[in-house]
Image: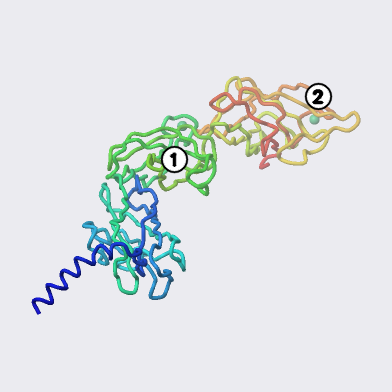
Amino acid sequence: MRGLLMALGVLAVALSPIVGTVPARAAPDFDSAYVFESAYLANMAPGDTGTFSVFFQNTGALTWTLSTATQVNLATCRLDKVSCGVPPEHFSWNPGSWLSTTAYATQSKSDVVPGDSSSFFYQVKASTSTAPGTYRFNGDLVVAATGALIHPEGYYQEASVTGAPDQAPSDVQATIGDTNGVGGVNDVRVAFTAPARNKTTAYDVQRREGDCSAAPADTAFVKLATVTAQPGQTGTYIDLDRTNGTYCYQVRVPDPIRSSFVYSNQAAAVVTASTIGVVPTSTSAVMTQSGGIFTDRYYTGDKIDLVFSVAIKLAAASIRVADSDCGAPTSQAGPPAACMGTDSWTTSDVVCGVNASCVLSLDRKTLTIMLTAPPTQVAPGSVAGLQYPITIIEGHGITDANGTAWDLAGSADRVFGPVGQ
Ligand SMILES: [Ca+2]
Ligand SMILES: [Ca+2]
């Protein structure tokens, strides 16, 4: 036996140069070559999802065919690059779409003939609690049916997570008050809590005309101010002197990773009592008392109440009135009836402090005028005297706090008399 073994050993040595010259062995059934991969995922924020893809070429003899014994998977490997077909360290990044607990993905082409390539792609999701850092995902191709590694390459890709972005407030509220004593209840106070975990202390307060039906990024939102608020503290902004209307407020903070913003909830404010931009009109004109001297005409002792849409002030106030010599006006809004032929109105002036006492109510919205003497006639008209109903055709020295004149033509009621009307 010993001699024979020796002889075979000599034979083997003698034959080995000959073996080296035979043609290359045929390709193994399964083999692969790494081709390329997608870029690493950078600047992911907690909660973000990204996709990795990698291409491998089939350099073996068999076609890789899905759902058969020759299906090829991209198996998961641990960070040591050699422990494959086991759950990887970062399995928690599986958004639920990985092929299994031990494979990221299968071949994306159903058939990959020898020489052809296929991608393998899968998603990774950074949970909201992921700490900033770089996370590596290792893998290699395996025969799906057996888990056998085809040609270990040490494939990996990486995802980088930055710190959690700043959050927008979630408790924005808008309340209306009279902060500066100008223009009535028309100051909108926007208040919010700065999220406790934020790094930023700068919050943009935005306003949009109209209700809160718009998308946060709607360009109709305009920035009013950048409010400083420490984490966990309250930020406030007061939007002064709004005109009447509906407004939508929101707060945003920059999201530099996405070159964008994150937005708060929206809060609407409906301003109804502002006098800014409101033209004073009379909403009611009623004769409340007759002087008793005449029952058919406006005369000494008659008292009227004029109610205005906003608080008013008086400065050498007077009104000019026209009567109904040409017929009654068609509505309480006036004007006096048009005159036919030679008919004409009687017109007269009522001047506060001269032939009338003029008193404003506490809220300055009701003006009570009592004639202390006959109105001062301007034009005699067709019939002597000021026959009811009376229409106010001019007002002087009766304005809102800003000096805006009483809009007679736009008033709902400027006709009064007889008493009770
Ligand atoms: Ca105000
Ligand atoms: Ca008359």
Disc 1 on helix, strand or loop? strand
- Residue farthest to the left, as pictured: 2
The residue identified by callout 2 is: 380
Left/right of residue 338 with respect to residue 36 in the rendered view: right
Disc 2 on helix, strand or loop? loop
Left/right of residue 71 with respect to residue 297 in the rendered view: left
| Mark in the foreground, 1 or 2 | 1
Q: Amino acid at mark 2?
A: Pro
**Which residue is rendered at x = 56% and y = 28% of the image?**
400
Q: Nearer the viewer, residue 260 or 371?
A: 260
Q: Nearer the viewer, residue 79 or 94?
A: 79
**Which residue is rendered at x = 45% and y = 66% of the image?**
113
Q: Amino acid at mark 1?
A: Ile
Mark 1 neighbour density, 10 Å: few (under 14) some (14–19) many (20 or more): many
Q: Would you say the residues marked 1 and 2 are in contact, meaning their CB atoms lie under 8 Å apart?
A: no
- Residue 349 position, x and y percent, is 70, 23
Does mark 2 have its CB less than 8 Å from ligand 2?
A: yes
Mark 1 or mark 2, earlier in chain? 1
